[in-house]
Amino acid sequence: MLQDQQLLRIPGPSPIPPSVQRAMSQPMIGHRGKETSAMLQEIAPGLKRVFGTKQDVAIITGSGTAGLEAAVVNTVKPGDEVLVIVTGAFGDRFTKICDAYNIKSHRLDVEWGQALQPADVKEFVQNHPEITAVFSTYCETSTGILNPIKELAAAVREVSDALIIVDGVSCVGGVATEMDDWGIDIMVTGSQKAFMLPAGLTFIAASERAWTTIESNPQRGFYLDLTKYRDNLLKDTTPFTPALSLLFGLQQVLQLLDAEGLEQVYARHTLMMNMTRAAFKALDIPLLTTDEDASPTVTAVKPEDFDAEAFRKVIKQEFGLTVAGGQQHLSGKIFRVGHMGYCSPADVLQTISLIEIGLVKVGKEIELGKGIAAAQQVYLQEGVLI
């Protein structure tokens, strides 16, 4: 392989478009100057469209986990009781954040690889009226499932006033997100996934209901206090020094999303998911999730007759192709293929072709080209993207 050629197909960080890389290489400007204020003014409406909200979207310099922690520390306080729906490693992360703040968290564990059932959540909340917030992931990165958060919010609202707080880090920007219409109270995402940027920014929006709770919370932290971000956004600035180079890139990302059109962006991600899943099915390699639960941004594969880690090592050495491994108890048992952000059907076809060679190299008996043919057929059936 070429020394400088790396093919990154993991569920984040994702590849960065060349125009975004160029934008991020602009000369530095003053973060309190008019140029930065003008940039924030331009960025704001684009973020609102992606989130599906009329509320301002705060931009925090930090990883996606900073956004998750901000969601916790601003909306609940020590002694409160919350429900955390754990469908994988990142649902589990919400419980760890709550534990760090002495918040009593009830867990509703779902088998890894399956999406949550809104009826089960409704019943749990109904039986625990003291719960003030329900935490869930939208896409569970560790398993490649997409949780039905629209239906989740509707089910909880039928029996409780608990806030609906969602980790959308690995899918917002790649799947439809209608925060206001669906009744989501807090939505969080990060820069390094479908937003096609390096890690370092987290975005968070809150509903009017959430703001009422946040404003009455006496312990919102310091750096992560969302009221500071909201109040500074009204003045087209930030409470703390922003990551300006990433903001340059974000400005360009939003222009790219607008040029493609959000509906087309979401259709592209769904198409890439369908192509990827069809390829593995054609190769008789099991998938961790059902078609109904699958995420358009990442596909989890659970091989039965070859070693997942040996396979990952081969395609990395041969082609510079990186796919992700499993996490926690799925470590060594699955691998995950990212198809989000700066990724196209052409990239998927390349990835599947290299995967087929890697499978042969680790001794998996397949018919070369069978996965590619299945993916090509999906592409032809679902139509050429315009």
Image (cartoon, helix red, strand yellow):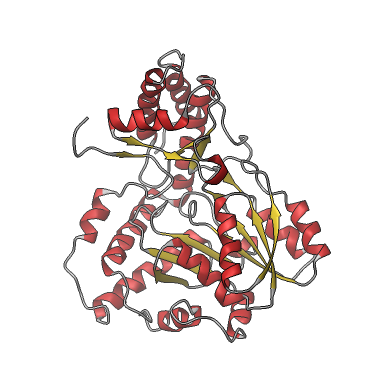
Residue 284 appears anywhere in the view: yes
65 on left or right of 109: left
Q: Residue at x 45, y 28 (%)?
A: 379
Q: So how many labels did they put on this image?
A: 0
Q: Residue 364, relative to residue 256: is it above or below? A: above
Residue, far left: 27
Residue 102: x and y, percent? 62, 74
Q: Residue 6, relative to residue 134: is it above or below? A: above
Q: Residue 366, relative to residue 329: is it above or below? A: above
Q: Residue at x 50, y 81 (%)?
A: 221
Which residue is nearer to you in this view: 160 or 108?
108
Q: Quadrant of the N terminus?
A: top left
Q: Quadrant of residue 163?
A: bottom right
81 on left or right of 325: right
98 on left or right of 361: right
Which residue is nearer to you in this view: 49 or 12?
12
Residue 276: x and y, percent? 47, 31
Q: Quadrant of the C terminus?
A: top left
Q: Quadrant of residue 358?
A: top left
Which residue is nearer to you in this view: 179 or 203?
203
Residue 113: x and y, percent? 61, 41
Q: Residue 241, relative to residue 85: is it above or below? A: below
Q: Residue at x 81, y 57 (%)?
A: 123
Residue, far right: 127
Residue 74: x and y, percent? 56, 77
Residue 338 appears anywhere in the view: no
Q: Residue at x 41, y 29 (%)?
A: 310
